Amino acid sequence: MLLWVKAFHVIFVVCWFAGLFYLPRLFVYHAMAEDRATVEQLKVMERKLFRFVTPFAVLSVGLGLWMLVLVPGYLAMGWMHAKLALVALLVAYHGWCGVHVARLRDDRDTHTHRWFRVFNELPVLILFPVVILVVVKPF
């Protein structure tokens, strides 16, 4: 059972990250857009992508918790503590994306495309250490 849960956890994490890599890229385009039609189209794309990717986040976290129930010994391992802290940051980032979707929808977000370009890179700073922690288990 554990291997099935783990397989689907990895699948949903990949899908979640795909969305988190693309959504802020839409924010970059939105911040650069000058014509109203493009801005309105980007609002639709941002909303739809955020709604599409959110269930992957929920499923990723849910299956991760299920694995902790199946193997509670993971909670005694330092690498898991670090991973869970990074996952908490990722969940916060996901929520922050939702805030930007709402602000951009209401024409209230004043960040520049350069700011969103930096914001777009933050999930990579989480992905790398999470993969290393899970594969190498350094603690």
Image (cartoon, rainbow, N blue to C red):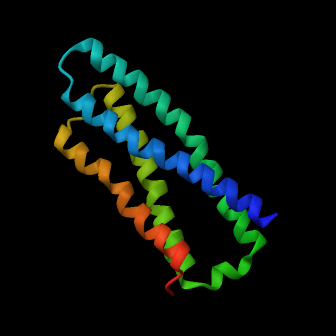
Give the left or right position of residue 80, taking residue 67 as reference: left
Q: Nearer the viewer, residue 67 or 131?
A: 131
Quarter location, residue 98 = top left
Observer-nearest of 7 and 125: 7
Q: Is residue 111 above or below residue 121?
A: above
Please provide percent x and percent y for residue 25: 32, 38
Side (left or right) of 58 relative to 112: right
2 sits to left or right of 79: right
Q: Is residue 108 visible?
A: no
Q: Residue drawn at (20%, 15%), measured in percent from left and top?
A: 35
Name the quarter where the N terminus is drawn: bottom right
Q: State the residue lying farthest toward the top.
A: 37
Name the residue rendered at 57%, 49% in the picture.
Answer: 57
Q: Does residue 100 lie above or below 57 as drawn?
A: above
Q: Horizontal and vertical percent for residue 136? A: 51, 79
Among the 4 quarters of the image, the one containing residue 67: bottom right
| Side of 66 where 131 appears, left or right | left
Residue 72, position in %: x, y?
Answer: 73, 77
- Vertical arrangement, residue 119 with respect to residue 29, above or below: below
Residue lying farthest to the right in this orientation: 1
Residue found 61% across the figure and 49% down from its top: 58
Total numbered circles: 0
For the point 20% across and 45% down, the residue is 115
Asked whether residue 54 appears in the rendered view, the answer is yes
Which image quadrant is residue 89 in?
bottom left
